[in-house]
Amino acid sequence: MPADASPPTALSAPAALPAEAQARWAHPVAGWITTGVGAVELTSLSPTRAARSLALLSIGMDATLATVDHKRAAGQAVSSDAALASAAAAILLATQPLLTNESLIAHHAEAATWVGYHVGRDTTAAVAAGQAIGRATAASLLALAAADGAAAAPRTEWTEYDANGAPLPREEGVWVPTPRMAKPGTDPEWGHVRPLVLPSGAAARVPPPPAWNSPEFAQVRSAFRATMGNVSQADLALAWKWDLRQSTPTPVGAWYLIARDLVLRDGLDVRASARAFVLLGAAINDTVIACWESKYHYRLARPIQWMQAEVDPVWLPPLIDTPSHPSYPSGHSAISAAAATVLGHLFPADAATLEAQAHDASRSRVVGGIHWPIDTETGAAQGRQVADLVLAALTSTTREP
């Protein structure tokens, strides 16, 4: 990626960093993943926008490190810590416009920039060179990303009319704003954002669900109602664990943190770690786009709509609130299956454990009362499909850790 940078200027090193800052930034890629997920939580990003922000962060770090390697090979002293800090801070602030607490990112960037200097690895000139590279990398990446359509995608859909001004259908089995919360649909056009690897979100569209009044969907409703009659305390605990609504890391951020812990456990260096997060980021980002494209293409009703209309007018899910977008397929399931597939490829000894975690994330949405079983089954299949496509496209040029 980048990029000729402007000549570095002289810098004055700050006072010695606190021990906690040195520990946080001892592995700068992991540190910036932690910071990025924290920003997702702080700004209450939707899973769609969290997936894009963290994917661009991952790509930006990998591109930055590639440029640092190139400059070093040419004999230039460059601080990778400073380069990563400049790139990561710029990408997070650009992809999270609601990140009003910019001083928090600036504080992290200041500490991360100077870790190499304080341990005797970098000079002030190397830090300045790294900052210039990071800024140029971020600018180049963000210029490319500006054409993906995300900025123009509306955050909500006021459900009287669709994006073309046509009245939305109200027939049986069609999603409407969730009872009790009654929020408009979240990110209704996200399925048209340009993916990183897939040709389009529609390229991985899931098969249609059974017709609402078919015997097949009658069995789906019956199975869901039976599940609701046998929810255990363990089921409720699982639903709560994986709820991960906005104002949390979201399921996207949760899987980034799982990946971060694996990277740190196995002692991957910064280059191998950045490449791993590129694979994870591309798979989750494109899965979310495909999932949202399918959701708003089919607009399947949520279980709460049928339960309140046909079973109990005051019924609510046993513990968690139903999200404000159509039911089919499940975003949690798609995201989790994609992440488990990529991480299982990178960390094969952990593949079974990762698959079990993805299964738990899927099951939590049914026992939590917010998804039909077909939502989670189909979402998981979609996530695996997209992850396999991403791995096939990128692993020829991306080495495994």
Image (tube, rainbow, N blue to C red):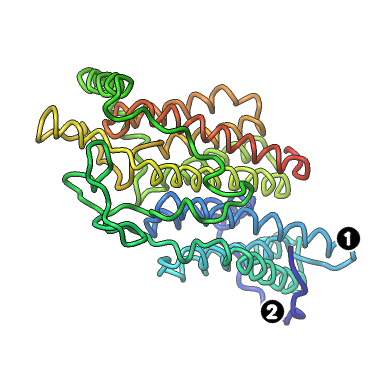
Residue 303, given in percent of the width and then of the height, sits at 25, 33
Figure quadrant of residue 239: top left
Can you identify the residue that label 2 sits on? Answer: 11
Seen at 78% across and 45% down, the residue is 397
Rounded to the nearest angstrom, the CA distance separating label 2 from label 1 is: 23 Å
Can you identify the residue that label 1 sits on? Answer: 73
Query: Residue farthest to the left?
Result: 313
User: Which mark, residue 362?
Assistant: none
Q: Is residue 158 left or right of residue 253?
A: left
Pointer 2 and pointer 1: residues touching (CB < 8 Å)?
A: no
Residue 359, given in percent of the width and then of the height, sits at 45, 26
Q: 388 or 274: nearer the eye?
A: 388
Does 52 appear above or below 316?
Answer: below
Residue 129, given in percent of the width and then of the height, sits at 75, 72
Amino acid identity at mark 1: Ala
Seen at 50% across and 39% down, the residue is 205
Seen at 43% across and 66% down, the residue is 99
Amino acid identity at mark 2: Leu
The tally of labels here is 2
Would you call the spot at circle 1 few (<14 residues within 10 Å), some (14-19), or many (20 or more)? few
